[in-house]
């Protein structure tokens, strides 16, 4: 049976997958720190909410395949594959996430990923997605 802290993180990710920013926000502390390493950190719930809303401008589909999740002393580690799709984006990449949970809410959220993989998919993902769709139609 998963710990309460793991459930908080799983609920948070489920809210993100559903594009339910309000539900995700309710699982954050007011002073949350969120960082996609190596990008600058967002500090505070309002800043994180703005970032999440920004994702919805170009991402219409978000999914997560959780490979591993573990918790020790309020720190939840995730190893997962994130998929982002939209009119200008089509990418899937490995992410290692660290969530510090305090009082049933996420106080620190740090995601690490290979920047070269993400940039490459940002540049070529939409072209490859269109190519795949055209190829499937031709069969």
Image (tube, rainbow, N blue to C red):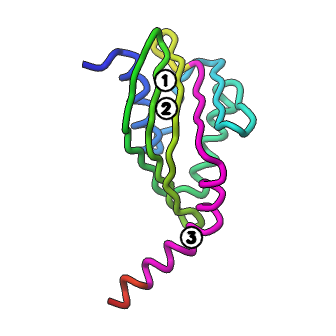
Q: Which circle, 3 or 1, is nearer the viewer?
A: 3
Q: Give the magenta-colored segment's residue range.
A: 107-134
Q: Where in the figure is residue 34, as x and y percent of width and height?
A: 64, 29
Up-down relation of residue 43 to residue 101 (above or below) = below
Q: Residues within 10 Å of mark 1 (few under 14, many from 20)?
A: many
Q: Residues within 10 Å of mark 2 (few under 14, many from 20)?
A: many
Q: Is residue 45 left or right of residue 68?
A: right
Up-down relation of residue 53 to residue 75 (above or below) = below
Magenta span main SS: helix
Q: Considering depth in this image, is 93 or 18 the residue closer to the camera?
A: 93
Q: Where in the figure is residue 123, as x and y percent of width and height?
A: 65, 66
Residue most extreme to the left: 1
Q: Where in the figure is residue 117, as x and y percent of width and height?
A: 60, 55
Q: Circle 2 sits on which residue?
A: 24
Please name the residue shown 44% across and 77% down the image. 132
Q: Earlier in the sequence, mark 3 or mark 1?
A: 1
Label 1: which secondary element: loop
- Please identify the quadrant where the C terminus is shown: bottom left
Q: Circle 1 sits on which residue?
A: 27
Label 3: which secondary element: helix
Please name the residue shown 36% across and 23% down the image. 7
Residue most extreme to the right: 40
Q: Considering depth in this image, is 89 or 93 the residue closer to the camera?
A: 93
Q: Is residue 53 left or right of residue 43?
A: left
**Quarter where residue 79 is shown:** top left
**Tag 1 near tag 2, CB within 8 Å:** yes
126 in the magenta segment: yes
Q: Is residue 4 left or right of residue 36?
A: left
Please name the residue shown 46% across and 9% down the image. 73
Q: Circle 3 sits on which residue?
A: 126
Rounded to the nearest angstrom, the CA distance separating label 2 from label 3 is 28 Å
Label 2: which secondary element: helix
């Amino acid at each position: 049976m998963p710990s309460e802290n793991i459930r908080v993180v799983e609920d948070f990710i489920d809210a993100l997958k559903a594009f339910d920013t309000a539900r995700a926000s309710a699982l954050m502390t007011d002073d949350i720190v969120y960082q996609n390493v190596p990008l600058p950190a967002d500090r505070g719930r309002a800043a994180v909410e703005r970032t999440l809303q920004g994702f919805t401008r170009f991402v219409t589909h978000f999914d997560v395949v959780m490979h591993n999740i573990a918790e020790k002393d309020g720190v939840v580690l995730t190893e997962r594959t994130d998929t982002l799709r939209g009119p200008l984006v089509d990418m899937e990449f490995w992410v290692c996430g660290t969530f510090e949970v305090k009082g049933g809410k996420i106080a620190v959220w740090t995601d690490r990923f290979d920047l070269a993989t993400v940039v490459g998919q940002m540049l070529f993902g939409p072209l490859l997605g269109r190519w795949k769709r055209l190829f499937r139609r031709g069969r």
